[in-house]
């Protein structure tokens, strides 16, 4: 009987009835960052409707849509429209999700949110003959080892371990299969994510339930065409000049009427998406930044929100702001920072316009240009998994080759380092021998960010031969990004104990207290006996506290 129920999860129909089901979904979660007092609480509930659409080879395709979604973060209602977009997911004969299909203009960050719903519907076949199954699956956090155990009339699912830096503290999911996926499901998970891009440690506690909802509430999913391409592919109708002008006038009236500093950035981003057809045009940039007179805090919120939209129009708004001759440097700086925070693929138009800005086409050489160039290196690194950024990389390399002043060399060397691309090693190494200490230091720091064995050897060799103390300090800081070899660690210990320059000692201490190279506490305590500088002493004490 259990075999039959398991097969029903991937079947097109049962007893002549199409697979359609609806659940009441409830989630309670807490997210604690590495600071004990930094904790967020998330509560979410929705009605989730699921329907089989078609079968393709050995994959069954199901549509999923959430409705009446209610999302609260720390008790405050948050926008939840992104969670209510319909999409398709494919399940193979083993019960694993293999593919997704989304409406054509769905942003990448929204796709990741929606995938989270689908992963709840993965299940593996178990039976009386085969009551315990261990297999690999994937969810939004990565690939993990999981066990399924039969405990009639339930099946118990337990995640064992992730391949990535995720520690599973608790994972219990119990569900009862029905004619179309589950009759009910309860789950409780506790995981710790280490080595995150922003926080070193994030701990999440999550409890959620699915209970069959009857009678089934009306959901737009049930009215969609059974030919998914009819609703997955959106063919946008071009706007006339009059339509665009009308949208610009609406936007001009909307923003002053809102107290946008009281809106969450995500909420304002949702409102601005409606104006995507005109947001990326130069006229809109002029309208918002020159013709309107918003308060400084309002402009800060505006740029933050536009950066979060992450579509072609918002990217062009930010790049056009940077390249606009009549926009002030404060707005340009905010546009640069908004682009730096994004992770989505840049459109070709945005890529070429940004490359143009790097090569100094529109921005006067002044304080803003170095900020732009170095930030663009970070933009490339943040988006390295989201499309081709060679246009910008080439612009930065060209800028480095064309640099004549030491200041420009430092700027472009920093940008190359921020890209963190080992293919750029050959562009950096000639500057190791530059006659100016600042240029050598910028090169060393860039090599530290690239983080590969050849770059490591170059930095070590430079340190061994370098006479300038500023460059020595920079080399020690750069090596903190590596796990240094035993010979260099011995040298760093000697420097930390006896070098007469307190800043050089501090850089050595920072290396010896870094994650990859941290000394045992007994050795750190020995260092305290020799350290006379208060800042350095405090650095060692803090490292001892972290190790306790």
Image (tube, rainbow, N blue to C red):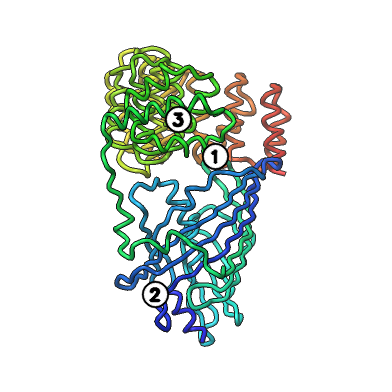
Residue 1 x %, y % = 51, 87
Nearest to the eye among marks 2 and 1: give it: 2
Q: Which of 444 and 348 is in front in this view?
A: 348
Alpha carbon of mark 3 to alpha carbon of mark 1: how far? 16 Å
Q: Nearer the viewer, residue 217 or 426?
A: 217
Q: Residue 93 carries which label?
A: 2
Circle 2 crowding by C-alpha within 10 Å: few under 14, some 14–19, many from 20 = some
**Element on which disc 2 rests:** loop
Q: Residue 338 carries which label?
A: 3
Q: Which of marks 3 and 1 is nearer the N terminus?
A: 1
Instruction: Please indicate, yes or no, whether residue 121 appears anywhere in the rendered image.
Output: yes
Q: Mark 1 points at which residue?
A: 198
Alpha carbon of mark 2 to alpha carbon of mark 1: how far? 38 Å
Nearest to the eye among marks 3 and 1: give it: 3
Instruction: Please indicate, yes or no, whether residue 432 appears anywhere in the rendered image.
Output: no
Residue 349 x %, y % = 28, 33
Q: Which residue is drawn at 61% across and 40% down?
A: 518
**Quarter of the figure with residue 316:** top left
Q: Earlier in the sequence, mark 2 or mark 3?
A: 2
Residue 472 is left or right of residue 393, and the answer is right
Circle 1 crowding by C-alpha within 10 Å: few under 14, some 14–19, many from 20 = few
Q: Which residue is drawn at 55% across and 22% down?
A: 297
Q: Which of marks 2 and 1 is nearer the N terminus?
A: 2
Whether pointer 2 and pointer 3 mark residues with C-beta atoms closer than 8 Å, the reply is no
Q: In which quarter of the image is the C terminus?
A: top right
């Amino acid at each position: 009987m259990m075999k039959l129920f398991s097969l029903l999860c991937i079947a097109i129909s049962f007893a002549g009835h199409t697979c359609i089901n609806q659940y009441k979904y409830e989630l309670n979660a807490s997210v604690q960052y590495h600071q004990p007092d930094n904790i967020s609480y998330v509560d979410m509930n929705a009605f989730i409707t699921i329907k089989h659409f078609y079968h393709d080879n050995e994959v069954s395709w199901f549509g999923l849509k959430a409705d009446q979604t209610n999302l609260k973060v720390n008790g405050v209602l948050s926008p939840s429209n992104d969670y209510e977009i319909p999409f398709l997911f494919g399940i193979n004969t083993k019960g694993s999700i293999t593919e997704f299909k989304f409406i054509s203009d769905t942003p990448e960050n929204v796709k990741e949110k929606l995938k989270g719903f689908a992963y709840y519907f993965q299940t593996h076949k178990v039976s009386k003959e085969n009551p315990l199954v261990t297999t690999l699956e994937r969810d939004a956090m990565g690939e993990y080892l999981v066990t399924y155990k039969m405990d009639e009339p339930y099946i118990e699912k337990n995640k064992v371990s992730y391949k990535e830096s995720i520690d599973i503290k608790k994972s219990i999911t119990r569900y009862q299969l029905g004619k179309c996926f589950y009759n009910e499901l309860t789950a409780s998970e506790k995981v710790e994510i280490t080595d995150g891009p922003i926080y070193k440690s994030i701990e999440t506690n999550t409890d959620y339930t699915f209970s069959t909802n009857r009678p089934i509430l009306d959901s737009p999913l049930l009215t969609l065409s059974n030919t998914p391409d009819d609703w997955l592919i959106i063919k946008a109708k071009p706007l006339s000049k009059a339509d665009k002008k009308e949208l610009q006038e609406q936007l001009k009236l909307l923003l002053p009427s809102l107290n946008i500093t009281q809106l969450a950035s995500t909420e304002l981003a949702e409102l601005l998406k409606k104006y995507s057809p005109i947001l990326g045009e130069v006229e809109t940039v002029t309208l918002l930044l020159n013709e309107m007179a918003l308060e400084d805090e309002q402009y800060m919120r505006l740029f933050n929100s536009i950066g979060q939209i992450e579509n072609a129009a918002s990217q062009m708004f930010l790049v056009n702001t940077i390249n606009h001759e009549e926009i002030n440097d404060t707005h340009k700086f905010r546009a640069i920072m908004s682009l730096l925070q994004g992770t989505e693929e840049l459109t070709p138009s945005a890529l070429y316009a940004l490359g143009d800005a790097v090569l100094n086409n529109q921005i006067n050489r002044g304080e803003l240009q170095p900020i732009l160039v170095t930030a663009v290196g970070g933009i490339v690194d943040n988006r390295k998994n989201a499309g081709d950024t060679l246009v910008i990389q080439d612009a930065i390399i060209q800028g480095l080759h064309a640099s004549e002043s030491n200041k420009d060399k430092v700027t472009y060397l920093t940008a190359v380092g921020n890209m963190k691309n080992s293919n750029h090693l050959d562009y950096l190494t000639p500057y190791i021998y530059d006659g100016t200490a600042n240029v050598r230091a910028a090169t060393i720091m860039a090599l530290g960010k690239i983080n590969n064995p050849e770059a490591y050897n170059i930095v070590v060799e430079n340190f061994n031969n370098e006479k300038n103390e500023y460059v020595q300090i920079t080399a020690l800081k750069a090596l903190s990004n590596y796990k240094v070899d035993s010979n260099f660690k011995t040298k760093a210990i000697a420097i930390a104990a006896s070098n007469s320059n307190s800043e050089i000692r501090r850089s050595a201490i920072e290396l010896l207290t870094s994650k990859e190279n941290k000394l045992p506490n007994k050795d750190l305590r020995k260092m305290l006996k020799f350290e006379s500088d208060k800042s350095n002493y405090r650095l060692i004490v803090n490292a001892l506290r972290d190790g306790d």
